[in-house]
Amino acid sequence: MAHHKSAVRQHRRGVRRAAVNKMNKSALRTEIKRVRKAVQDKNVEEAKSLLPQSFAAIDKSVKKKAIHKNKGRRLRSRLSQQVENIAPAPSKA
């Protein structure tokens, strides 16, 4: 444990920042899971409607530096590709 006043303050600050980062990352993962679930269920409308929300969560995490900007770009790209590649269910005609 830190002994100097400044080190104690920095430790407290680090604990607070870690909690904020954890909260942001958790919200981000939840949004991504919702989109991926819609993709897995081949629900095009739901996936496309959830995409802007997940992009907002990704951008917010990048802005708060909870994740690296390149990781944010990679996540956005992959989610977009997954949503675009949803094949419609074959009709039973």
Image (cartoon, helix red, strand yellow):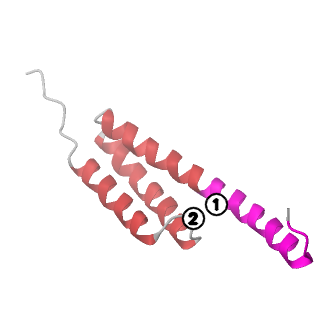
On the image, the x and y values in percent for residue 26 come to 59, 49
Q: Residue 48 in magenta?
A: no
Cα separation, mark 2 vs mark 1, equals 5 Å
Instruction: Give coordinates of residue 37: x percent, y percent.
Output: 39, 37
On residue 57, the disc is none
Q: Using a 10 Å C-alpha cutoff, classify the residue at mark 2 as few (fewer than 14 neighbours), some (14 to 19) or many (20 or more).
A: some
The span picked out in magenta is: 2-24
Task: Identify which residue is drawn at 44% across, 71% down.
Answer: 69
In which quadrant is the N terminus drawn?
bottom right
Image marks 2 and 1: residues in contact by CB distance under 8 Å: yes
Report the side of 92 relative to 4 (left or right): left
Image coordinates of residue 15 in percent, x first then y, are: 76, 61
Q: Nearer the viewer, residue 6 or 82?
A: 6
SS assignment at label 1: helix
Left or right: residue 2 versus residue 92 is right
Left or right, residue 70 beside residue 62: left
Which residue is the site of mark 1?
21
Q: Is residue 42 above or below residue 62?
A: above
76 in relation to 33, above or below: below
Q: Amino acid at mark 1?
A: Asn
> Which corner quadrant of the image does residue 21 belong to?
bottom right
Residue beneath the point at 38% across and 58% down = 75
Q: Which residue is at a point 20% across and 47% down the rendered structure image?
A: 85
Mark nearer the N terminus (2 vs 1): 1
**Residue marked by disc 2:** 66
Q: Is residue 16 magenta?
A: yes
Residue 41 percent across, percent down from the top left = 32, 32
